[in-house]
Amino acid sequence: MQKKIKWGIMGPGRIAHKFAQSLKCSEAAEMTAVGSRSIERAEKFAKEYGVSRSYGSYADLAADTDVDIIYVATPHPAHFECTMLCLKAGKAVLCEKPFTLNASETKVLIKTARASKLFLMEAMWMRYLPAIVKVRELLTQGAIGETRMVKADFGNRIPWEPSGRLLNPELGGGALLDVGIYPVSFASMVLGASPTKLTGVAYLGETGVDEQFSAVLGYEAGKIATLSGAVRTSLINEARIIGTDGYIRVPDFWRASTLELYQNGKMEKFELPFRATGYIHEAEEAMYCLREGLTESSVMPLDESLKIMKILDTLRKQWGLKYPQEK
């Protein structure tokens, strides 16, 4: 039996709970430690998931010599500082999306990880879901001919809570970083991470964050992606990949469990549910990379994560949107 990979959880919030629920389903993983700014929260999380050690500071977690890899699940603005803390302590890191607030921060993290030969990966869980793996297989097989367009949107109408995470600029709130990154990452997966043209419009609401947006990305050979995201408007929440010989429809693509392939007037449906809460698939990819001595994933390469962050930066610049932490 292979040696278990020992995980540390940094930031025991909502997403960390989902990740931990999935991790318990893997015999290859062991939750060894959890760190929070509050020892009470850390201890509560540890008790719930049978974690042996809990820390009242992120630094103490990063310093734990028994931990192989740390899952950073803190709020957006803390991703850079927390991931850097882990890397400086010699730890492999799986950092929640978005990697950071902007491309400059992401670039520094990548440079640091590569200099130290440490594993680093953006936790874009969508990429590893069985249904999305099937999408990539179908595209590779040429099931819809030449891919020409991608259409994807993801948005919900959240309650009006100006100080809440999604509407607070201090917390990196707004549609783009929270839900909008999914359609952008999906388009990057299908069409590539380097569009030749990029334009978008957004509505900046009362709190100053982007409550909704739409963007058009143009690629070589005339390929186009039209993407939308929202936190105060409910959208259709699906993705379509349109080719010369058919198209693929993925309902709820960000948490996909089914997809439909349309060819010659016929539809074939694939049922591909994810395990547990779905986060196990990205965790298994990270553990595979560690066992193989890899410092990044071929499914979510670091250079692609950086290019995606540059796309988000370009859109925000067009909208005149800066976060308070940015100079």
Image (cartoon, helix red, strand yellow):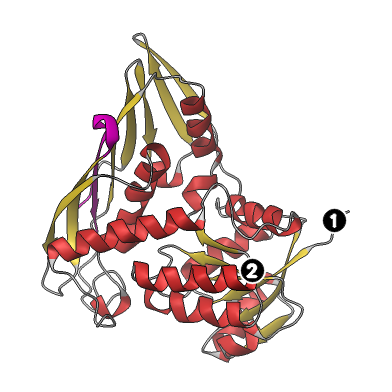
- The secondary element bearing badge 1 is classed as loop
| Observer-nearest of 2 and 218 | 218
| Observer-nearest of 36 and 138 | 138
Residue 25 visible in the snapshot = no
- Region in magenta: 219-235
Q: Point out residue 160 in the picture as x, y percentages from the top left corner.
A: 20, 69
The image quarter in which residue 68 lies: bottom right
| Residue under the point 51% across and 59% down | 123
Q: Point out the image quarter for the C terminus.
A: bottom left
Question: What is the distance, in whole Å, between disc 2 and disc 1 at their CAs?
Answer: 21 Å
- The secondary element bearing badge 2 is classed as loop
Q: Is residue 272 left or right of residue 116?
A: left
Q: Point out residue 281 in the picture as x, y percentages from the top left corner.
A: 60, 49
Q: Is residue 291 left or right of residue 45?
A: right
The single residue placed furthest to the top in the displayed view is: 264
The single residue placed furthest to the right in the displayed view is: 1
